[in-house]
Image: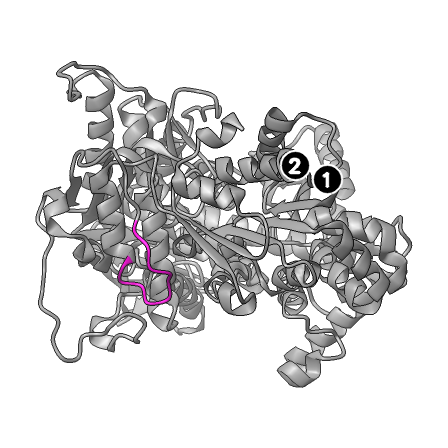
Amino acid sequence: MDYLDRLNDMQRLAAVHTEGPLLILAGAGSGKTSTMTCRIAYLIQEKGVSPYNILAVTFTNKAAKEMRDRVEQLVGSGLNMWILTFHSACLRILRSHADVLGYGRDFAVYDPADQKTLVKNICKDLQIDTKKFNPAYFLSIISKCKEERITPKDYPREYGTDFREEMIHKVYDAYETQLHKNNAMDFDDLLLNAVRVFEQDEAVLLKYRNRFRYIMVDEYQDTNQIQYTFVRMLAEEHRNLCVVGDDDQCIYQWRGADIRNILEFEKDFPGTKVVKLDQNYRSTGNILEAAHSVISHNAARKPKKLWTEASGGSRITYFQAEDEREEANYIASEIHRLTAGSYTLEEGRKEGRKFSEFAILYRTNAQSRTFEEALSYRNIPYRVLGGLRYYDRKEIKDIMCYMRIVQNRADDLALVRIINEPKRGVGGKTIEKLQTLARVRGESLFDTLLDKDVVASLSAKAGQGIRELTEMILSFSEESGNMRVSDLYDGLLVRTGYMKMLEDQNTVESETRIENLMEFKSVIYDYEEEDKDLSLSDFMERIALLADVDNHDAGENAVVLMTLHSAKGLEFPFVFMPGMEDGLFPGWRAFDRPDGLEEERRLCYVGITRAKERLWMTSAQRRMLYGKIDYTRESQFMREIDPKLLEGDGVYQKKPSAGMFRDGARAPEAIRPFDQLKYARQMTKRNAEAMQQSAADSFAQGDRVSHPKFGEGEVLEASGKILRVRFADGDKKLAIGFAPLKKL
């Protein structure tokens, strides 16, 4: 049992406690994987438990593989033991017993692409316009219903029967009917149907209860109600259930995780043995003290405090920048300094650190852009984990292709990318035929699309979509010289239907894509501030040069950029946490839910405990985000850290007064963080509507007008849809409906 000798006292206590319910509260960096693998080895080698009688479940294939490999290193390979993800375990059960629910055992498992195709076909049958109601919108609601065990039959009772809810009900009902007809399940069904099998066939339930006499669940704080039910049904008889988790790291409630599962485990399973793994093997003492300073403000948590033998260490460096650019430049310069060899270790040596030892952890993907630019400027290699580089993201590439085709109508590559984005009924085969025709005729694809006979040969939907697209591109192209780049951008987002497409999807992914599109306005505004006469071609040239930086492979020596959510489970010697401002982190949405602030605080705790040696936390006095400059105040979490743990800039401390909100309470409007994203979306639509509004105004010779780029002027001539206006710098011809003119 030499493997037990490598454990500390609390880890060993957890590993050898095998009978009855066990709750292992494993803090960040406390060696939970070692404890779990040693416990499995102990069950097999010392207690004589057959591997056949052990079930270990976790959330990711990577975690399951790591646990399986480490167990096999201790007890040998070839064991008939289930160490699987929740979905894999449920799939195995259903492969043997799907007939209980009327499925064939060879049922198909539909991935998200299959689901989307199915819903699109259903919408077509029900004559639902997918431009107004995107399939992703229906799928997100169906997934939520399955998680809450709401069937199509239950839906009207739970949500009502107005027009929208009745439409959702019809789609949900048809979706379930089609799945059964196709002998198929989606990923939510794997969990839900495994539970249904247990409920409908007691013999099957007893079979797996008798088999899995010892059950272990990793990351228990992330389980939802279906997973909780699945585990409880299996463990109810033998009660040898060991769950491992940390309520302080429950950061996925927005996707269904229920923190009550771990907080109320002792109530659900009387006689539970609780073991706290509170010795940290990752971070220095000061980093752990800072993490505890923050997380201790949460009410919904188990009392515990991490400690380490590596006491002390450097204090947390706090830097308050004037704006987001200075913040990014400060972080890039610190990384440059430490990798160049000017970092003094305690032993007195100077040693340049590797780029891969540094991580920048931010709250939203939209923040990555300024760091990518600052690192690129200093030739510091970086890679973005959990997402693409900012300029490589689909929505950014899409909107840049719209801008490219406005600038250069011969850009066939850009046109092919956006011709059916959003959907215009132009399929892949149609695009191929049009490209072939353009090559034969020796002209650009756009010029081919201007041929009325060609468009007339397409389907009615495709023809209408092509006509609207080409007319819009021509109008923006002709007027681009009379528009600010930011106005043209707003117009494209709205007039193309791209913004509406994302809003209709109504998913977490689509909201993130909207955030990125709004942040792109910040890029445009930055360039317009530098150059008041910035043209579209100037802007596209600068972006093309900037976005040409190579993306680095995961194995390269490069700085890591990622969101705080993506960082869970990872660790780095040096960590930067930027954007420590109320409204950004904690995010403004946190103030709208009683438990919202507590979940944001847990996310902050996760971020702090990723750092092994040094931690920097930064904020900006003013920040341009989503195209709007906002004057900020330091994050509430910065004010919760014990000041003696900080160095650098001072954190503003104010005594709470009557009227100041407490944790979980809704803040008075006067001090609520500003919702920058909501404001940016409103302004984008308002600017685009202002252009169209000019078409409704009646302009006559002699009218005084204002233009955001040219200033005030006088209408010299009004002819059809064209105005000739005299401004201070000369006469301009402007198109009504595209030029953002306002009559004074």
CA gap, disc 2 and disc 1: 6 Å
Check disc 2 and report the residue beneath it: 44
Q: Residue at x 72, y 48 (%)?
A: 89
Q: Is residue 378 above or below residue 206?
A: above
Q: Quadrant of residue 344?
A: top left
Q: Secondary structure at mark 1?
A: loop
**Residue range of the region highlighted in magenta in the rendering:** 296-305
Instruction: Name the disc covering residue 326, or none.
Output: none
Main structural element of the magenta stretch: helix, strand or loop? loop
- Residue 200, position as x, y percentages in the image: 83, 68
Q: Quadrant of residue 717?
A: bottom left
Instruction: Verify whether residue 300 appears in magenta.
Output: yes
- Residue 121, position as x, y percentages in the image: 79, 60
Callout 2 amino acid: Ile
- 28, 42: nearer the viewer: 42
Check disc 1 and report the residue beneath it: 50
Callout 1 amino acid: Ser
Is 693 on the left-hand or right-hand side of 527? right
Does the rendering let one see residue 116?
A: yes
- Residue 454, position as x, y percentages in the image: 75, 45
Q: Residue at x 22, y 47 (%)?
A: 289
Is 284 on the left-hand or right-hand side of 645? right
CB contact under 8 Å: marks 2 and 1: yes
